[in-house]
Image (spheres, rainbow, N blue to C red):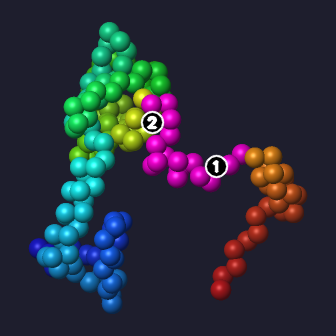
Amino acid sequence: MASRLLARPVESNRPKVVRRRPYEPLSLAELEAIARDGSARDMSEPRATRARYDTETDLVVVELRSGSIVGVPRLRIRPLRHATFAAIKGIRVTGNGANLEWPDLDEGLEFAHFLELALSMPTSQSSGRRGGKSRSKAKAAAARRNGAKGGRPKKRSS
């Protein structure tokens, strides 16, 4: 079975495995190291274990592996603003606690984003996502100058 698995980049603090061919099969020792690294990361990141919708308080309530309980008002979660209570009650935890899903709505939410909504502050995962979305006056002026020149230049094939 190990011979069918392909080498894939894995972000970790351990040294990267150098390969001659990009898709050389991983050894059993490498697979075990990747599993250990994933288990350590899994235990250090907050993960959801159970989720429910409380109709009395209008909160989506999630229990974390640590035993903590976090609730977010339904109206703060955009896909749930106009959903029926029955559809919201169908919440489930997926992805080893990394995602919340509402199958009846065909909607989902990363648990990191749920925590962001609960804490009203960005998490480290979301700050990178927003890095390129600067809205300064200088950037707007540069975009207008670029537009006056005909827009973004065409890519040249080398």
Question: Quadrant location of residue 158?
Answer: bottom right
Q: Is residue 126 magenta?
A: yes
Looking at the image, residue 120 lies above or below residue 81: below
Residue 50, can we see it? no
Of 96 and 39, the residue lying toward us: 39
Q: Which residue is identified by label 2? A: 116
Circle 1 crowding by C-alpha within 10 Å: few under 14, some 14–19, many from 20: few
Looking at the image, residue 39 lies above or below residue 59: below
Q: Which residue is identified by label 1? A: 133
Under mark 2, the amino acid is: Glu
- Using the numbered discs, state the Cα–Cα distance from disc 2 to disc 1 in whole angstroms: 18 Å
Q: Residue at x 35, y 71 (%)?
A: 9
Of 38 and 83, the residue lying toward us: 38
Under mark 1, the amino acid is: Lys
Q: Residue at x 46, y 43 (%)?
A: 123
Question: Quadrant location of residue 68?
Answer: top left
**Viewer-nearest of labels 2 and 1?**
2
- Residue 101 location (% of width, % of height): 32, 36
